[in-house]
Amino acid sequence: MNRIKEVLQEKGIKQTWLAEKLGKSYNIVNGYVQNRTQPRLETLLAIANILNIDVKELIVSNKEI
């Protein structure tokens, strides 16, 4: 599970903008945001860099599940 959706909402950023910055399609990013698919670690790090946050902010702790 990831927190991409929550972080995008907190920052007021659209999925289309993130998709463009990542160089991925909207459908792929939407899958990440809706937690239908999980991004690879490299992609998660790229998202954190684009959003200027620590990658830990994008991950739900396994202790919270």
Image (cartoon, rainbow, N blue to C red):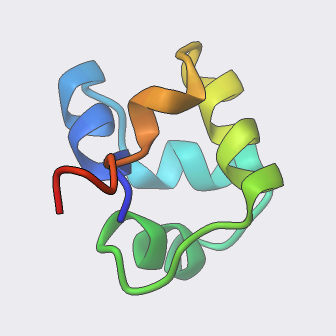
Q: Is residue 7 above or below residue 33?
A: above
Q: Is residue 22 left or right of residue 6?
A: right
Q: Nearer the viewer, residue 12 or 40?
A: 40
Quadrant position of the N terminus in the picture: bottom left
Q: Is residue 38 left or right of residue 25?
A: left
Instruction: Name the residue: 70% across, 24% down.
Output: 49
Q: Is residue 2 above or below residue 17?
A: below
Q: Nearer the viewer, residue 38 or 22?
A: 38
Examine the image and state in which quarter residue 57 appears.
Answer: top left
Residue 65: x, y in percent? 17, 63
Residue 38: x, y in percent? 54, 73
Q: Is residue 57 left or right of residue 23?
A: left
Residue 46: x, y in percent? 75, 39
Residue 15: x, y in percent? 42, 53
Most extreme residue toward the front is 63
Instruction: Name the residue: 29% across, 21% down.
Output: 11
Q: Is residue 19 above or below residue 32?
A: above
Instruction: Name the residue: 58% across, 30% down.
Output: 55
Label tally: 0
Examine the image and state in which quarter residue 21 appears.
Answer: top right
Instruction: Name the residue: 56% across, 18% down.
Output: 54
